[in-house]
Each structure stands twice: as structure tokens, then as C-alpha cells.
Amino acid sequence: MLKSYGYAAFDAKTPLGAFSFDRREPSSEDVLIEILYCGVCHSDLHQARNEWHGTTFPIVPGHEIVGRVLQTGSNVSAFKPGDCVGVGCMVDSCGICTDCRDDLEQFCQEAVFTYNSPDKHTGKMTYGGYSNQIVVDQHFVLHISEKLNPAAAAPLLCAGITTYSPLKHWNVGKGQKVGIVGLGGLGHMGVKFAHAFGAEVVLFTTSPDKIADGKRLGAAEVVISKNPEEMQKHLQSFDFILNTVAAPHDLDQYLTLLKRDGSLCLVGVPDHPHPAPNVGNLIFKRRALTGSLIGGIRETQEMLDFCAAHDIVSDIELIAMQDINQAYERMLKNDVKYRFVIDMRTLQHSDQQD
Ligand code: NAP
Ligand code: ZN
């Protein structure tokens, strides 16, 4: 076993703190990675606080991992020590079901998520990226171009792919009017990608202080969603709306903005359900209410390569591991521009309990 250390939540109520634990010995298929940076996703907070009611404690969150390869197994040829690599939300899947064969491992019934998921190798729960190192099957390791700032690339592993994948799936591009709801970690990547794909982007935000940033990131227009008059101006005009909001809210206010055959795609996973939308808003214009889950490994690599080619990374605020609890509180106040990333050099082994 590999002695490892990081930060964990020990229950739903107390702040995260230092934690020592074992990782499996790398097999011939595995890559051992020194973690340099880990992004802070709202899903980390939801699960650390057991808001989705599926958390096994202690939990080591973190699924926006960038690091350097320390060691590779004998069957690994695509990576070598020193390579800059990423790990996102998944570390394993069955490899043979139709979802896996279609490169959509995120939908595999046996997908193993990077943390809080039963690990087939050890029978214990997986531990995520708020830690010094990780052992991952080579299929779930991504190449990160040396052109990208590694700290700012970390959020691409979840916030990036979760917005890139639905925008691609629903063929967002030139000539289309596309809405992004919420300017947080996911939303700001959604604005960047939709703009890069050539769409006319409208950002919906509850935060008037984010108007200038919305435009800088690529939105042609920024709408304050709490203002019904501003919303009315956009009735029946959108081809596609990507909703990243992490809290329950009225979906009808966005369904009514879609054209005939338009789609409202939800990626936010609130702790309580949204109020049920009015069926009439779906059937009278044949609109679709849909959702999307991260993206497969092949598409994640495609997204990372697209980012390297187009110089796209996340806007980040680098924090020390010890600042994680304060970062969670700020995330709950929508006070993050636009992703916290933990600098793992701040994680001291001497801080750890053994
Ligand atoms: P985040 O950084 O906290 O951003 C969420 C944004 O939503 C906020 O910045 C805020 O933007 C807006 N918002 C928050 N509360 C709101 C409210 N009550 N009403 C309206 N808008 C509100 O969170 P994130 O990391 O981007 O994650 C967003 C959600 O996606 C979370 O639920 C997360 O678990 C989920 N997620 C899903 C997937 C997937 O695969 N489907 C992957 C990753 C994350 P404004 O200030 O602009 O209003
Ligand atoms: Zn995430």
C-alpha cells in the first residue's frame, strides 16, 4: 500500500481537516501521479456535506486533478515519468458495455468515480484529489499540453468537460443564440466554449457585479435573471440554454425563452428538486428539457486538445489546502471568480494525523 495524505470531511457538519490513508500499489495498468493542483467543484461541497445523501465518510473530495507522472506500470506506453497529466471525475468503468464501447464511460453502470465510489481494486471507497498523489488506470489518465498553465487547466477536468460535452452534443455553433445560466465554475467555462464555437452567447446571472466579466468571457449580452422585464425581451428566441445553477429554481422562466424545438439542458444537481415545470411550456413549442453528465474520456481528451489549440483555460483563484473551508463558504455566496484551485504544495505531510 502507498501511504498518502490529504484533506477529508469526516462528517457532514465539521470542517475538512488533515487525513492520512493508503492508496493501492500501482499495477501494470496503472499510472502513479503526484498531484500538483486540484480544482474545487460545487459537487465536492455537495458531497462533503452529504447533500446528495450518498456520502461515505471520511471523504477526500477533488476531481479536477492535474499532476506529474511519477511511475508507470509495465503495460503503460502512452505516459512516462514527468508527463503533465489530468484526472477528472472517473477512474474506472466496466470497459465492455455499450456505453463504454461508445466512449461514454460516464453512463456505465459500473463507472467508478474519483472519490466516494467503491474501488474494484481494493473494495474500499475511492479518495480524490485533495491529496498528495493518486493511482489511476491508464485509460482514465488524460494528456495535458505543456502550453496550458497547469493550475488553470485543472478545472477543465470537470467544469470544462461538463459544459463542452452538451454544447457539442446539441451542435452549438455559428448562427445560434445560446444561453448560459449561472456564472460560476461551470458557467464561465460554458460561456468561453459557446463563444469559441461561434454562437451568440447570452449569460443569465443573479449577480449584477458579474456583468463586465460575463462580457469579457465572451457573452454578447448579460441578463439579470431576477429582472422579469429583461427576461421578457428574450422570449422564444434561444436555440439552446445550458443551466449550471446549483440550487432549485423556476425552470419555466428559461423554457419560455426557447424557440420551437429548443432545448434546456440541466447540469446543476441541487440538493432539493426544482419546482415542476409547466407542461404547456414543453408541448406547445415541442421544447425539450434534458440533462448531461460530465463527458467520456475520449471527449475529455478532445476538449483538452481544443483548449490547448485555442488557448482556453479556467479563470482561477489559487488557494492553500488549509483555506478549503473558507472557499466552500465563499462558493455558497457565489463569491468565486471563477474557480478555486488548491495548490498542493501547501499540503504539508507534517500537518497530518497518522
Ligand atoms: P458554482 O461555481 O457554485 O456556480 C453555480 C452558479 O449558479 C453560481 O455562481 C451562481 O451564478 C448560480 N446560482 C447559485 N445559486 C443560485 C440560485 N439560488 N439561483 C440562481 N442562480 C444561482 O458551482 P459549479 O461548480 O459551477 O457547479 C454547478 C452545479 O453543477 C452543482 O450543482 C454541481 O454539483 C453540478 N455539476 C454537475 C456536473 C454534471 O456532470 N452534470 C458536473 C459538475 C458539477 P450567478 O452568480 O451568476 O447567478
Ligand atoms: Zn465537478
Image: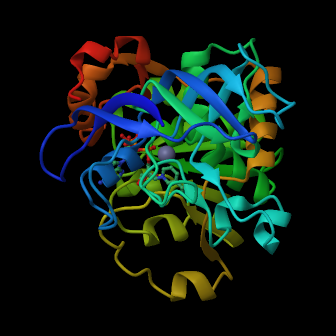
Q: Is residue 159 above or below residue 65?
A: below
Residue 12's spot in the image, x, y percent?
Answer: 18, 53
Q: Is residue 187 above or below residue 67?
A: below
The quarter holding residue 27 reads top right
Say which of 324 and 139 sits in front.
139
Question: Which residue is at a point 22% across and 18% down the rendered structure image?
Answer: 351
Say which of 111 and 250 sits in front.
111
Circle count:
0
Say which of 343 and 120 sits in front.
120
For residue 284, side relative to residue 17 (left or right): right
Residue 112's spot in the image, x, y percent?
Answer: 57, 58
Q: Is residue 238 visible?
A: no
For residue 332, side relative to residue 103 (left or right): left
For residue 331, side relative to residue 105 (left or right): left
Residue 281's spot in the image, x, y percent?
Answer: 54, 81
Say which of 99 and 240 sits in front.
99
The quarter holding residue 262 reads bottom right
Question: Which residue is at a point 78% across and 64% down the rendered structure image?
Answer: 100
